[in-house]
Amino acid sequence: MTMPRPPRPKPRAWSAARRYPRLHIARTALGKCLEVLDAQPGPRPPAGEISLVFLTDKALARLHKDFLDDPAPTDVITFPGDAAEDFAGEICVSVDRAILEAKKRRRPFALELTLYLVHGWLHLAGLDDLTPRGRQAMRRGERRLLTALKQARAIPDFKLR
């Protein structure tokens, strides 16, 4: 006799702000991506909504300067949430940086942008990349989660118009 499966957890609430006019986001695919990430073993962000923001390099560099006192361009910035507000946090990514890095690394744009989401998700889960040991853990987590997303066919099909 087989045991009944436990009920599937309710999908996490999330929102996405497209501040990059040329970016097309398939919302259903993005939701599936987050569901797959949340279903993986290991560290995960706290409960609550996750906000995703897709920005230009210039806009993300402004946030980097204003909040982290560093004017250099970057690919991802995360802001922790507030459990009392049922908010896990916000992941801000540079679409411009993903375009440049995808070309440089000869990989699909959608995969590069998904890597940034995974990286931000891991930051919200408590990982950091400020030390060599932290960077190693972050890279392992990125590889593990990207593999899970590929196996689940859950890499969002981000497109530029």
Image (spheres, rainbow, N blue to C red):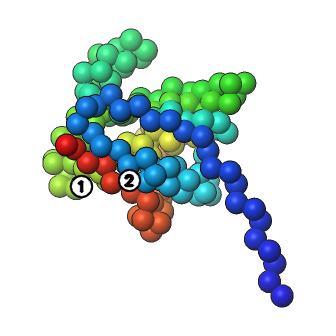
Q: Which residue is drawn at 45% across and 68% down?
A: 151
Question: Which of the image's four quarters has the C terminus?
Answer: top left
User: Which of the two residues, 87 or 42, is positioned nearer the viewer here?
Assistant: 87
* Residue 78 marker: none
Q: Position of residue 134 (x, y in %)?
A: 49, 41
Amino acid residing under circle 2: Pro
Q: Which residue is drawn at 22% across and 44% down?
A: 160
Looking at the image, residue 9 lies above or below residue 89: below
- Whether residue 45 sits left or right of residue 55 in the image: it is right
Q: Name the residue: 59% across, 58% down.
A: 40
**What residue would you read off at disc 1?**
108
In the rendered view of the protein, which quadrant contains the N terminus? bottom right
Q: Which residue is drawn at 43% across and 54% down?
A: 29
Quarter holding residue 18: top left
Q: Which amino acid does label 1 sit on?
A: Pro
Q: Which residue is under mark 2?
A: 156
Q: Position of residue 102 (x, y in %)?
A: 21, 48
**Numbered marks: total:** 2
